[in-house]
Amino acid sequence: MREHLPPIIIVGGGLAGVFCALKMAPTPVAIFAPTPIGYSGSSFWAQGGIAAAVEEGDTPENHANDTVAAGGGIVDRDIALTMAREARARIEDLAAMGTPFDRSALGGFAPSQEAAHSRRRIVRVKGDVAGRAIMDILAKEVARTPSIHIVEGYSAQEIVMRDGRAVGVHARDNDGMIHETPCAALILATGGIGHLYRVTTNPLEARGIGVAMAARAGALIADAEFVQFHPTAIDIDADPAPLATEALRGEGATIVDRNGRRFLLDIDPNGELAPRDIVARGVFASIKAGDGAFLDARSAIGAEFSARFPTVYGSCMSAGIDPSRELIPIAPAAHYHMGGVWTDARGRTSLDGLWAVGEVASTGVHGANRLASNSLLEAIVFGARVAEDVRATPFASIEWRPQADRIEPIPRDRDFAVIEELRDLMSANVGVIRNGPSLAVAVKSIRRMMSWTSDIEARNMLTTALFVAATALERRESRGAHFRSDFPQADVTLARRSLNTLDAVLRVADEVEA
């Protein structure tokens, strides 16, 4: 199979990877994806939409300012402004492909409001099905694009390096066979890390594999400590937890405790529309105090719920909850990783031959706390940027002979047990509210678990988890989504991004063990 693949490989079949491949056309490219295109990654599950200044009176500068304000003081302002300025064009690209964005009576976009945005700028599809609709359209577009070669059922596990350059990738197929495939350019679009946590809105493949692959190859990892917890995951013991989109709050739904009190108003004057980190901590604290937390859309949405928010409605009804007449139980859930593989404005990592795009990348646009609906935007803006950069890059041929395909040992019960223990540990010790002793326990435990398994996927998950825990331990302050109860204030001297290698976080772990 590998003899017939194009020399450019994209790992990941979500929005970032697929949009990048389409923008690469007619340059040949292969996409490695563990699940079918259109259903791969978190993009399919995205509800809210794409943020862009499309409303009259709004500007990219306003959008960038909101992005910077939400990001806890460490957003790269130039990157944020660049993204905001390119937003409208990329949305128009999707519209031209057939994405049925919600429109006004006059035919223009009909954006909605979400938390921490100063204007209505969330371009949606039928209320809460943006991700599904976009990926359906892109899957059809890929199917009629001859330059894109799809390799489904392949999970990348390791980057092949030669003379400091990424020259190939190891991927495991559904039968456990490991294939070593050479490439001239490797683009990571592997998504997020949500399934490192017990409660998450992310699909199963969001395990942080791309971060670990890049780190083990020697790449810089940025801002790993910043994990965003969505405050309104529907609390019905599902894995992943279904999401109650933030657009519900933008349309007037409130958050109350079991006594009907809007407790968030005690924390922030913006209440339900405060930044996500503030809302998530408030919801977490109410649940921990025994008062519970619920989304109340009965007055704001009521009988229109099924028509305006069909995805959320279906999730609730499947659990026996009628959201038009009943409160929706909610809880914070790991949702988005602001950190990832460090890249520049073109998506280039610190390693030659390796690019990263989407949630696996850390461009500096999100800072310590992602602004709502900037994630899909980042995927398409930087997907196009990476495509342009890769197409313009001359590649020198590197002669090497791939190893023969081999069978990877089947994961054992112990390997699965390690993963389950890791997820519990991350939720308990590296979650919404953190502290030094708990983080130190997490670092020591993850380091110990690394010796318990030889399964490559489990070890990749542990590697990324170690980055999150160790950098959270090192950041002795609270900033954005990273909240330390033992250091509850921001430290002006730490108003900078974190940059680490695998060797650096292993040294932190060794110091904790000492």
Image (tube, rainbow, N blue to C red):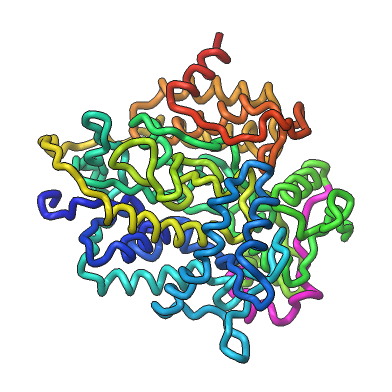
Q: Nearer the viewer, residue 284 or 54?
A: 54
* Above or below, comparing residue 81 to residue 126 in the picture: above
Residue drawn at 14 percent across, 49 percent down: 2
Q: Nearer the viewer, residue 55 or 145?
A: 55
Snapshot quadrant of residue 105: bottom right
Residue 199 falls left or right of residue 304 = left
* Above or below, comparing residue 490 to residue 92 in the picture: above
Residue drawn at 68 percent across, 44 percent down: 72
Question: Does 299 lie within the magenta span?
Answer: yes
Q: Residue furthest top?
A: 514
Question: Does 292 lie within the magenta span?
Answer: yes
Q: Nearer the viewer, residue 438 or 350?
A: 350
Q: Nearer the viewer, residue 300 or 50?
A: 50
Residue drawn at 62 percent across, 58 percent down: 64
Q: Which residues are magenta?
A: 291-312
Residue drawn at 37 percent across, 57 percent down: 17
Q: Tally the marks.
A: 0
Q: Is residue 244 visible?
A: no
Q: Is residue 228 visible?
A: yes
Q: Residue furthest bottom?
A: 106
Which part of the image, by quadrant, shows the C terminus?
top right
Q: Residue 206: where, in percent of width, then height?
A: 46, 48
Q: Residue 163: where, in percent of width, then height?
A: 22, 29
* Above or below, comparing residue 396 to residue 31 in the picture: above
Q: Residue 158: where, in percent of width, then height?
A: 30, 36
Q: Residue 16: where, in percent of width, then height?
A: 41, 58
Snapshot quadrant of residue 491: top right
* Above or below, comparing residue 180 to residue 191 in the picture: above
